[in-house]
Image (cartoon, helix red, strand yellow):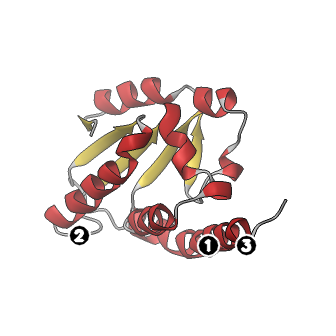
Amino acid sequence: MISRRNVFARLLAAAAGGAIAGRATIAAAAVVPGAPKVAYHLSDVDKVKFALGNIENHIKGEGGAGKVEIVLVVNGPALKAFRAANVNDGIARRLAAIVTAGVTLGACGNTLDAQKITVADLLPGFVRIDEGGVVRLARLQAQGYAYIRP
C-alpha cells in the first residue's frame, strides 16, 4: 500500500540524493591536507540524532567543511533509521547536510545482509562496507583516525 507519507519520504530521499551527488565529491575533495581524521561508530538506533548532532558540532568546531575528515560507520539496529522507505524527515535533512560537508557514510555489509536490504534501500550517500563495520573501524584507526562512539 502506498501512503502519502511513503511517497513524500521517497521524494525527499531522491531530492536529497540529487543534492548530495552534486556536492559530496566537491566537499570531500576540498579537505585540507593534514586535517584531523575521525571515525564515528553508530550502532544504537536511539543515538542516531545524538550522533548526527555530534558530527554537525564537530564540523562546526573544526571551522567548517573541509577542515576535518569524518567517516560515519553504521551497523546494527541504527541502520534502520536510514532506510529511505520510512525515513524521519529531520534525519534525512541532517544526513544530507553532513554528506554535503564531506562526511563519508558506510553501511556494514553484515548488517545489510542480516536486515535483507541493500544500500539502494538507504538514504543517498551510503556505501556498502563488505568487510563489515567493525573491521572497517579497526582499519581506519590503524590509518590514524580517531574513534568516537557517541
Element assignment for label 1 = helix
Residue identified by numbered label 3: 4
Q: How far apart are marks 1 and 2 (CA)?
A: 25 Å
Q: Disc 1 or 2, which lies upstream in sequence?
A: 1
C-beta proximity under 8 Å, tags 3 and 2: no
Residue 45 screen position, x and y as percent: 44, 40
Residue 133 screen position, x and y as percent: 48, 30
Element assignment for label 2 = loop
Q: Between residue 7 and residue 135, name the one nearer to us.
A: 7
Q: In the rendering, which numbered label is found on residue 12?
A: 1
Crowding at label 2, few (<14), some or many (≥20) Cα neighbours within 10 Å? some
Residue 125 screen position, x and y as percent: 55, 57
C-beta proximity under 8 Å, tags 1 and 2: no
Residue kind at label 2, given as amino acid type = Gly
Q: In the rendering, which numbered label is found on residue 64?
A: 2
Q: Between residue 75 and residue 135, name the one nearer to us.
A: 75
Crowding at label 3, few (<14), some or many (≥20) Cα neighbours within 10 Å? few
Q: Residue at x 66, y 32 (%)?
A: 115
Left/right placement of residue 55 relative to residue 61 reads right
**Height in image: 19 above or below 88?**
below
Q: Quadrant of residue 12?
A: bottom right
